[in-house]
Image: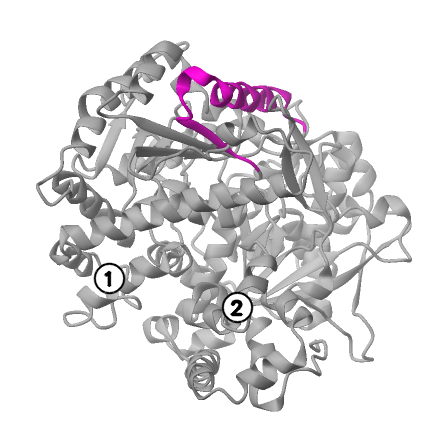
Amino acid sequence: MERYPDFPQIPERLSGLVDLAYNLWWSWHPEARLLFKQLSHPLWKECVHNPIRLMHHLPADVFDEAATDPDYLLRYDIVMHRFRRYMDERNGWFQEAYGEGGNGMRIAYFSAEFGLHHSLPFYAGGLGFLAGDHLKECSDLHVPVVGVGFMYADGYLHQRLTPDGWQEDIVETLDRAAAPITQVAGPDGKPLEVTVPLMDPDLLAYVWRVDVGRVPLYLLDTDHPANPPEYRSISSRLYTGDRELRLRQEIVLGVGGRRMLAALGVEFSAVHLNEGHPAFALLELLRERVEEGTPFDQAVREVRGTSIFTTHTPVPAGFDVFSDDLITKAFNSYPASLGLSTEEFLSLGRDPASPGSGFNMAMLALRLCGHANAVSERHGQVSRELFGGLWPGRPIDQVPVGSITNGVHLPTWLNSRMAALFDRHFFETSPNWLEEHDVSAIWKLVDAIPDGELWNLHIALKAKLLNRMRERRRRVFAGGNEDPGRFVAEGVMMDPSVLTIGFARRFSTYKRADLVFRDPERLRRILTHKKRPVQLIFAGKAHPSDEEGKRMLQRIYGFARRPEFEGRIAFLEDYGEQTAQYLVHGVDVWLNNPLPPMEASGTSGMKAAMNGVVNCSILDGWWLEGFNGVNGWAFGGEAQGGDRSNSDAEAIYRLLEEEITPLYYRKGLDGVPHDWVRLMKASIRCCAPRFSARRMVKEYVGHYYPHLLSCAASGFEVCPVDPPELSLAGREG
């Protein structure tokens, strides 16, 4: 039970604005955002596109004026009709495909982070935005899902660079009252409390709700006054380096998440784990069944038959591993509850390839989930090799770990002006193109768009990106105490007529953000070429504890300040979701060069491609599937041992010198580079349908979700799973 705060200044005629603001449906519908923007464009910008904050700051006379404006009221009525119709629809694609019986089933989707909108900074990177896009697409397709995660009060770190380019991490504490989130109340009207055991004393957590269209997302908050200080901070920060605190987080997420759903009365038929962080939820489900009298082996069968594990990690070091001592201390009552010895319990998290390394959350998830998948075809191969030890004696290609390549939520990431362009040219042939955007045939219509229209829009979006960079630096400078030398390093001199390459992602060493600087003099010649100049825009954050990532960032910032590069390199400070939108809409080329096979999938290049930005990427992750020879550039496909950085950098330089820059600057008499636009169209045509979250969610439904739901519906009689042996003494898995 939730209740929105009062906004007494909003007249009854516009009361629907409150309902709209508290549902993130507005975040992927431009016409809904426009309703808020039109109330006060300057304040909308100042509130960073957060409608709750906007409504708190606007005086009553603004709403009164809007309530008497016929044009505004017409737009308001149309948007509210669309919103209410969306929310009231009972059946959609999922029910049409799998019957209305699906309405009685629900999948609990657990994730440590959710990237939904910058007004709710509960994310660190790609994993969170993948989870957020998954929920949005489930909402659009009527897939019955409920999200479970954390309400990180201090979870988002802003990036501030010192004059020499060293990253400082600035904590942003969430103003709960000014965010599209509501606290859940219990039957007594007081804030609902969830008790999480396994700690002494028991931990108490509040519950918050975010409405993501039709999908509810429930978030645990340990900042409860009855908790000791070390407990109150458990949900404050995302991905702490303290192992004991990290274990507590994952206990709260998994065990607490399951108990939260029970306290809410939310019934679910299956569990989807987005990475291994929430895997303790499966232990809690197992314990419940055993304590209710279900034999252990049958309880394992039931949990496995209704659970799926999605792994995003291509290396063993990426999985959370806890010492036996920490696990034994935290779960001291669980072995007896399950009828296991301590060693049998610990064996649930053992890695056969490294049995003495500790309790591995990925191994726990694989042993208790009947289905598992990687997030690209290549990552599937890597994962089968990584997890093959759980199925001893099996050929690697028969290890039961599948793959569903990630996708992105097209309505969120497609620029609204680009969508309007598609609408004008698609409507006559395919008026429902947006609702059917995963149909490849529809995207052949992009070829009919006049080259000049697409090119002029792209140039306008690039100018918008560069203007935003200048405006941000101007506002910082106006605040005083600003080093004028930073203007060049942060892109003030950049030119929208110059070929612009974007590189934006977390600054981890394997992503090799500095690869293009392998030969600085050769790069300088490319960037400052008199006839075919190039600009580079970098953005991204290093993890607070990643010193090498910070040093890499600092080196790049140093290059951006060098006068010999003539302002052709920029670093955008404080990269986040909003900056990402500008970048994937506005650069010409998206560069990606991680060390293979370390890119499990990648999604930023997908977002760029659907907006006509051309990818130049190493053949790893999603690009192995996306590259078709005519929609961008690829390199690094050959197997190499040792340090391959020199050869990969050479490939990038060669592509820039011989293919990319000549093509970009080869323009017709009308000033349009028609061959380049042909490449843009090929990128959109190939990537928009194939790498959409719609295709991704439909594949989860087609490959996994019905099996999970039918297993539960059959009373666990039909559970076709192929899990690893539990290898428990005296038991069969």
Do we see residue 732 in this rendering? no
Q: Position of residue 652 (x, y in %)?
A: 30, 21
Which image quadrant for residue 646?
A: top left
Q: Residues within 10 Å of mark 2 (few under 14, many from 20)?
A: some
Which of the pair 626/631 is nearer the observer? 631
Q: Position of residue 158 (x, y in %)?
A: 64, 41
**Amino acid marked by disc 2:** Arg
Label 2 close to label 1 by CB (< 8 Å)? no
Q: Residue at x 70, y 51 (%)?
A: 152
The numbered mark, 2 or 1, whose residue comes first in the sequence reads 2
Helix, strand, or loop for circle 2?
loop
Chief SS of the magenta region = helix
Q: Which of pointers 2 and 1 indicates the residue nearer the eye? A: 1
Above or below 233: residue 26: below
Residue 194 left/right relative to 305: right
Do we see residue 495 in this rendering? yes
Q: Residue at x 57, y 21 (%)?
A: 554
Q: Which residue in the protein does label 1 denote?
A: 422
Q: Which residues are magenta?
A: 545-573
Which image quadrant for residue 20?
A: bottom right
Tag of residue 468? none
Residue 13 left/right relative to 563: right
